[in-house]
């Protein structure tokens, strides 16, 4: 569906900590995806669907970004953490799950969408985003 589409640079993802874009999947649904640097290799980034596996809470929020601590993406609602390189969670309510990935590649410092199951729509959030701009949370986590 997508071929190869240049998204951004590795430097941009590293400087901003994460980078959000929207794709259309094979079912015609818009999906938000975020890029995060993989601490195992500074020249690598990974792409994850922007939704906690425990409860459909966004892990990246416009204006806030993605909270990454010690190489792990933190769910702002319940505190589960996902390895930025593998997407695997081994704690909290999302334990023993893995974030759905989207195929990307890096060439000469540029990040390309290479997943044939999705088509790039736009940089930034889905047009289906909630109006309130934040996750519905009962958590006492502070970032």
Image (spheres, rainbow, N blue to C red):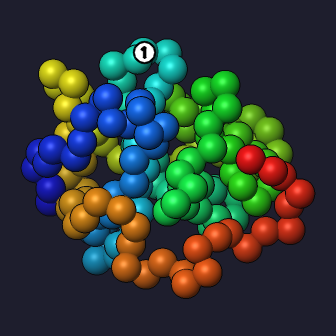
Residue at x 15% of width, y 56% of height: 2
Residue at x 74% of width, y 35% of height: 90
Of helix, strand and loop, which one carries label 1? loop
Q: Is residue 122 above or below residue 111?
A: below
Residue nearest the observer in this picture, 64 or 28: 64
Q: Is residue 138 left or right of residue 98?
A: right
Residue at x 64% of width, y 56% of height: 53
Residue nearest the observer in this picture, 78 or 14: 14
Q: Is residue 4 above or below residue 117?
A: above
Residue 69 falls in image quadrant: top right
Q: Position of residue 54 (x, y in %)?
A: 71, 58
On the image, numbered disc 1 is attached to which residue?
41
Residue 109 falls in image quadrant: top left
Q: Can residue 97 be seen here?
A: yes
Q: Position of residue 138 (x, y in %)?
A: 86, 68
Q: Is residue 18 above or below residue 52?
A: above
Residue at x 76% of width, y 60% of height: 77
Q: Is residue 86 left or right of residue 31?
A: right
Q: Is residue 14 above or below residue 115?
A: above
């Amino acid at each position: 569906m997508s071929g190869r589409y240049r998204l951004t640079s590795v430097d941009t993802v590293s400087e901003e900590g994460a980078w959000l874009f929207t794709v259309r999947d094979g079912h015609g649904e818009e999906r938000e995806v975020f890029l995060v640097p993989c601490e195992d290799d500074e020249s690598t980034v990974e792409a994850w669907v922007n939704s906690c596996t425990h409860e459909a809470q966004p892990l990246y929020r416009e204006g806030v970004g993605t909270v990454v601590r010690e190489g792990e993406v933190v769910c702002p609602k319940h505190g589960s953490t996902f390895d930025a390189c593998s997407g695997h969670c081994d704690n909290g309510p999302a334990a023993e799950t893995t974030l759905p990935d989207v195929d990307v590649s890096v060439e000469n410092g540029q990040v390309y969408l290479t997943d044939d199951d999705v088509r790039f729509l736009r940089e930034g959030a889905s047009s289906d985003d909630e109006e309130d701009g934040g996750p519905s949370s009962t958590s006492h986590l502070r970032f």
